[in-house]
Image (spheres, grey):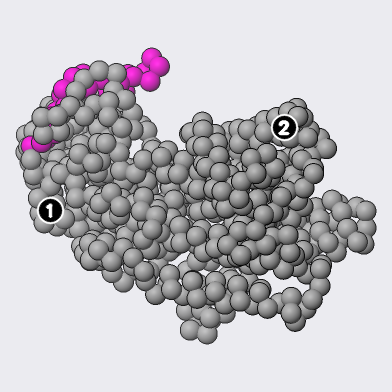
Amino acid sequence: MLLIENLSKSFGGVVAISDLNLNFTPGSLTAVIGPNGAGKTTFFNLIMGSLLPDKGRILLGGENIAGLSTPEIVRRGIARAFQIASIFPSLTVREALLAAVNAQRRQHAKLLARFPLAASRDRAEEIIEMVGLAMKADMVSRSLSHGDQKLLDIALALVLEPRVLLLDEPTAGMGPEERWLMIDTVHRLWERQKMTLVFIEHDMDIVFKIAQSIAVLSYGRVLAEGTPAAIRQHPAVIEAYLGSEYAAGRA
Amino acid sequence: MRTSSTRRDCLLALIVFALIAVLPMLWPSRGMSDFVIRLAAFGIFATSLNMLVGYAGLESFGHGLFFGLGAYSFALAMQRLGTSIPAALVLTLLLSVVVAGIVGAICVRLKEIYFAFLTLAFQMLLHSLIIAWTPLTGGDQGLTGGVPRPPFLGIRLDQPYHLYLFSAGLLVLCLLGMRHIVQSPFGYTLRLIRDNPARATSLGINVWAMRLAAFVIAGAFGSIGGVVMSLFVSGAFPDFAYWTISGEAIFMIMLGGTTLFLGPVAGAVMLLVLNDVVTKLTEHYGLVLGLIILLFALGLRKGLADYLAELWRARSAQRLAMPLPAAAPFAAPSNKLSGE
């Protein structure tokens, strides 16, 4: 589904991503882990076209999307949610999702119709239901709790019916309980939507609980990739990142 | 698609127009009808600026470009080409669309302060052009000699009541048009972009194209404000393109508020009344006005219409014994893409 080949990016003299190769198979659920500064968010920004790669290819279903603009990439089927919930603070949950549905259907430039379009309503309600924000649909987004803002961010990405969904630390800044609720929701959405899901996560309990495969980044390179079991036993990963705590035996 | 809210807006517009139409019979006063015509010019102009500032999040300091352009192109078309009034109006709109397209294409890429000052620069360019091109524009004396007002469709703009009705009609029609646009899917796309352009981009929205469209639409409506002014004074003056015109529209928006659609019109009423009252009482017009605006900025921290609307919302929320969600002082989330 998503194939990364020899991807590189530096900022000035600082190498952020260096000769990165990764393959995300259709319908897979992959965690991208690694220490701070490993290049995880930069990697997402490169896939989404927020940053231009210095070299390398990003193949989505065989088509090279490296160098395309973000809207073009979105239209080809990749969506993302952000580390810091990126929402539309002054709109209500429902308004934001209705407007996002318009964008997805290329009806966002319509001048003569009145908002909301009757045809967008069902889809918006479906998404609201899916992420569990039905009770808060009429709240102004900025007054939502942190966790609900993250859910709304993911909901905005889901509207785009992505083939590949990138989640940048879906549980960042959440308490333990909220965290597991979020992960349950994410896992449920992945099963239901049958999409390729890639998420950045720092909480190793979560990673080992839900990820099918794990890619470990370090200094912009792939330190290791494989199944959770394989990663857990990988000597370089244990040394560089996990520590002995998650090493084999503690399953 | 016609929905009940569209119908409600149209009905309201019709009622307001009817009220304005009968007003001179109840209150025959030259001062009143002049006030309504000036209000039409500035109400259209300030609302068109608020499409940019309030809905698209584009803080233009140079919107007066279109007021001046509208006044001069309409007056010149009438004087030099001898066209009919509707033809001159269409010509003015076309010219504004072209100019807004070019200026917008250059400006809307830029971030806040750069956008603001580049739009201002373009406005001052027009002002300089008007001053310099004396044979065409009359230079700093302004375009004198009167704007011909041939009758069309039974409308005789040389008669005060007709001009009054025509201006009020344009005001109501333009407000209705702009209201429809900000309530359209496009209008909500502008709100998305205002709130969070980066997120709008990752929804697949071409932010630049949408901003440009908003700039062109606002420019076209803004020029109609200039047309009304040019009909009112039967000419055009370099002041119409001076930066102070943009400043007045910004004051109107600040006084009235950016959130409610009619806020800028309320602001226009307030500024025009203040203007008339204060200039009668004192020479230090600027000082008094500045103090009042400071009072709004520091005291209410928002326009009067927005303030009253919030007060009303708070009251009804209290009656329902519910907390007021909009008043929660949450920080807006960061718009920047976080890089590692």
Q: Nearer the viewer's eye, disc 2 or disc 1? A: 2
Q: From the viewer's perspective, tell me whether residue B11 is left or right of residue A246.
A: right
| Picture residue at 38% right of the left edge, 63% below the top | A114
Q: From the viewer's perspective, tell me whether residue B302 is left or right of residue A98.
A: right
Q: Identify the residue under disc 2.
A: B136
Whole-angstrom CA distance, mark 2 to mark 1, is: 66 Å
Indicate yes or no whether the magenta region holds residue A19. Answer: yes
Q: Which residues are magenta?
A: A1-25
- Pick whichever, B48 or A193, lies toward us: B48
Percent across and percent down for residue B26 are: 75, 81
Query: Relative to residue A35, is residue A11 depicted above or below?
Result: above
Residue A144, quarter of picture = bottom left
- Pick whichever, B113 or B93, lies toward us: B93
* Residue B72 showing in the rendered view: no
Q: From the viewer's perspective, tell me whether residue B254 is left or right of residue A200.
A: right
| Picture residue at 73% right of the left edge, 60% below the top | B158
| Picture residue at 31% right of the left edge, 58% below the top | A97
Please identify the quadrant where the N terminus of chain B is shown: bottom left
Amino acid type at mark 2: Leu
**Residue that sits furthest to the top in the current view:** A13
**Residue that sits furthest to the bottom in the current view:** B319
Q: Identify the residue under disc 1.
A: A193
Indicate yes or no whether the magenta region holds residue A214. Answer: no
